[in-house]
Image (cartoon, grey):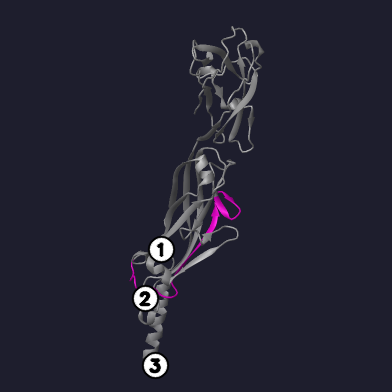
């Protein structure tokens, strides 16, 4: 009778000691950086980076994991979100966003989503390979962007709130009885960043063909346009070189030593489109802009100067370079 009472009292003491140790694991905030890419890269390419959720429950025998030991992760919320995922933005008022996937495997076969909420639980058999030392667990997380975003340049970020629930025993007694359970639920903030830069990918400029005429004053002017594909919201200027046969800032087509003066003007005006200073065309003066803001078109007029003498018959040509400067 006396021995039974002593054993009962010892059991109560052990249970009381266990309760005082609940929820003392450390879970530090984390970050992940995608680095710097262009707006066209983020639109067409899946970018990846990685981080880790750390659950540090301190010292303890590595081999002493119980079948009840487990860590569960859930993507609780994000500072910016759209549907089931967090999105990176330049700020609360930003209209451009880049969706981000948060996963526990590189191929994102088990993505953590906000809505619907998904929870992934790592059991003791999973945790064995994630132990750094003692009962300090490092859980790799993988982040991927979702291609298709059309965004302006800037510094993008989002803070993902990952809810972590853990049940880890750090001290095991006889008969695999847990003497020191660590049980709690907390939120780990993961700050994700990316720097997006401007870029231009395409300049489309058709040839100018004046056709044929017997006299210089019989050539009709040509109205055409060139287009450029640049980052949404980017600022740049476009210049046209003076050509291969220019003299005193005057463009000429040539046929051997014979010259035929011509000019290229901005839009339908008489303002020369040239290579420097105010002769360049600003991106803000585009004749038209695509819905996504990336393709801008610039109209121009090309004309053979009628005041010159008609040169010798023949085929005349020149080559003009289109340059774009940020």
Under tag 1, what secondary structure? loop
**Magenta region:** 59-86
Task: Estimate how packed mark 1 is, as few (under 14), some (14 to 19) or many (20 or more) residues with alpha carbons within 10 Å.
Answer: many
- What secondary structure is found at the residue carrying circle 3? loop
Residue picked out by circle 2 = 172
Residue lying farthest to the front in this orientation? 313
Q: Residue at x 43, y 54 (%)?
A: 50
Mark 2 vs mark 1, CA separation in Å: 17 Å
Question: Would you call the spot at circle 3 few (<14 residues within 10 Å), some (14-19), or many (20 or more)?
Answer: few
Residue position for label 1 = 25
Q: Residue furthest bottom?
A: 1
> Is residue 29 something that shows in the picture?
no
Task: Say which of marks 3 and 2 sits in front.
Answer: 2
The residue pinned by badge 3 equals 1
Tell me where residue 270 appears, x and y as whole percent.
62, 14
Magenta run includes residue 61: yes
Query: What residue sits 60% from the left and 11% below the top?
Result: 305
């Amino acid at each position: 009778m006396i021995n039974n009472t002593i054993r009962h009292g010892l059991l109560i003491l052990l249970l009381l000691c266990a309760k005082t140790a609940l929820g003392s694991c450390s879970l530090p905030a984390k970050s992940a950086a995608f680095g710097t890419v262009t707006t066209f890269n983020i639109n067409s390419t899946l970018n990846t980076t990685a981080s880790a959720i750390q659950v540090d429950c301190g010292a303890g025998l590595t081999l002493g994991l119980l079948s009840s030991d487990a860590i569960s992760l859930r993507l609780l919320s994000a500072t910016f979100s759209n549907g089931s995922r967090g999105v990176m933005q330049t700020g609360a008022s930003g209209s451009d966003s880049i969706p981000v996937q948060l996963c526990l495997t590189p191929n994102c076969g088990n993505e953590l989503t906000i809505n619907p909420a998904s929870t992934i639980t790592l059991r003791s058999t999973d945790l064995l390979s994630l132990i750094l030392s003692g009962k300090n667990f490092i859980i790799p997380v993988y982040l991927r962007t979702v291609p298709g975003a059309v965004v302006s340049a800037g510094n993008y970020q989002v803070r993902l709130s990952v809810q972590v629930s853990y049940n880890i025993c750090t001290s095991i007694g006889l008969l695999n009885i847990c003497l020191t359970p660590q049980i709690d639920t907390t939120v780990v903030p993961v700050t994700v960043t990316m720097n997006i830069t401007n870029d231009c990918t395409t300049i489309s400029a058709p040839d100018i063909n004046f056709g044929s005429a017997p006299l210089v004053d019989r050539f009709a002017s040509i109205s055409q346009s060139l287009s450029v594909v640049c980052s949404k919201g980017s600022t740049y200027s476009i210049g046209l070189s003076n050509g291969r046969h220019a003299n005193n800032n005057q463009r000429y087509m040539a046929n051997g030593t014979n010259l035929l003066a011509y000019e290229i003007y901005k839009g339908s005006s008489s303002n020369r489109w040239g290579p420097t200073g105010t002769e360049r065309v600003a991106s803000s003066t585009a004749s038209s802009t695509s819905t996504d803001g990336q393709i801008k078109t610039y109209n121009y007029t090309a004309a053979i100067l009628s005041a010159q003498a008609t040169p010798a018959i023949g085929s005349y040509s020149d080559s003009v370079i289109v340059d774009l400067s940020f």
